[in-house]
Image (cartoon, helix red, strand yellow):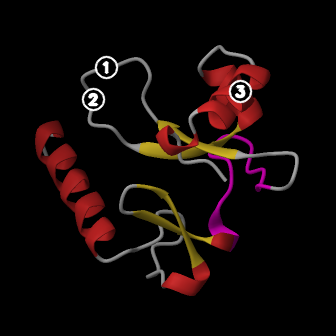
Amino acid sequence: MPREEAERQAAEERERAKRERRCPECTNKTFGEDSEMLAPDLYYHRGCIKCALCSRQPDNETSIIMAARETDDVFAPEILDPYCKFCYAKKFKTSAIKIADIVEIAPELGFCI
C-alpha cells in the first residue's frame, strides 16, 4: 500500500473515531459521565488519560497538556497527544514554570487537566 494511501486511511479513521466519540487510547466509545474532552471533539476516558511519553497520569501536581505529535514537519496533519508538563517541556524545549503561567493566563487557549 502506498504511503499516501495509508496516511489517508489513518486520517479517515481518526475522523471517524472523533465522530463516534471513541477514546484514542483504548478505542472504546466514551460517554458524558466517564470522559473528558482534551481537545475539540477528542474525548478520553478519565482512566485512559496519561502522558504519551512517560505514561504519568494527571494529579494535583501534574497537569496534562495536549500538543502536536509531530514537531519536525510543520505541514503534517495535526495529531494531538497528551503530555505531562515535564515531558511537554522537554519535547518543546520550554520550562514547566512557563507552561503553568500560560495555562493560568489563558486557560481557554489550552486543553489541560
Chief secondary structure of the magenta portion: loop
Residue 87, quarter of the rendered image: top right
Residue 16, quarter of the rendered image: bottom left
Residue displayed at 74% across by 46% down: 63
Mark 1 lies on residue: 74
Mark 1 burial class by Cα count in 10 Å: few <14, some 14-19, many 20+: few
Q: Which residues are magenta?
A: 47-58
Would you say 56 lies left or right of 50 here? right
Mark 2 burial class by Cα count in 10 Å: few <14, some 14-19, many 20+: few
Q: Nearer the viewer, mark 1 or mark 3?
A: 3
Mark 2, secondary structure of its residue? loop
- Sequence-earlier tag: 2 or 3: 2
Residue 3, quarter of the rendered image: top left
Q: CA distance from mark 2 to mark 3?
A: 28 Å
| Residue 71: image location, x then y, percent | 44, 22
Mark 2 lies on residue: 76
* Residue that extends furthest to the right in the rendered view of this protein: 61
Residue displayed at 73% across by 50% down: 55
Q: Is residue 55 magenta?
A: yes
Mark 1, secondary structure of its residue? loop
Residue displayed at 24% across by 23% down: 75
Q: Is residue 78 above or below residue 42?
A: above
Q: CA distance from mark 2 to mark 1?
A: 6 Å
| Residue 86: image location, x then y, percent | 76, 31
The one of 109 and 73 positioned closer to us in this rendering: 109
Q: Are marks 2 and 3 in contact (CB under 8 Å)?
A: no
Q: Is residue 44 above or below residue 103?
A: below
Amino acid type of the residue tagged 2 in the rendering: Ala
Q: Is residue 85 above or below residue 16?
A: above
Amino acid type of the residue tagged 1 in the rendering: Val
Q: Are marks 2 and 1 in contact (CB under 8 Å)?
A: yes
The tag on residue 101 is: 3
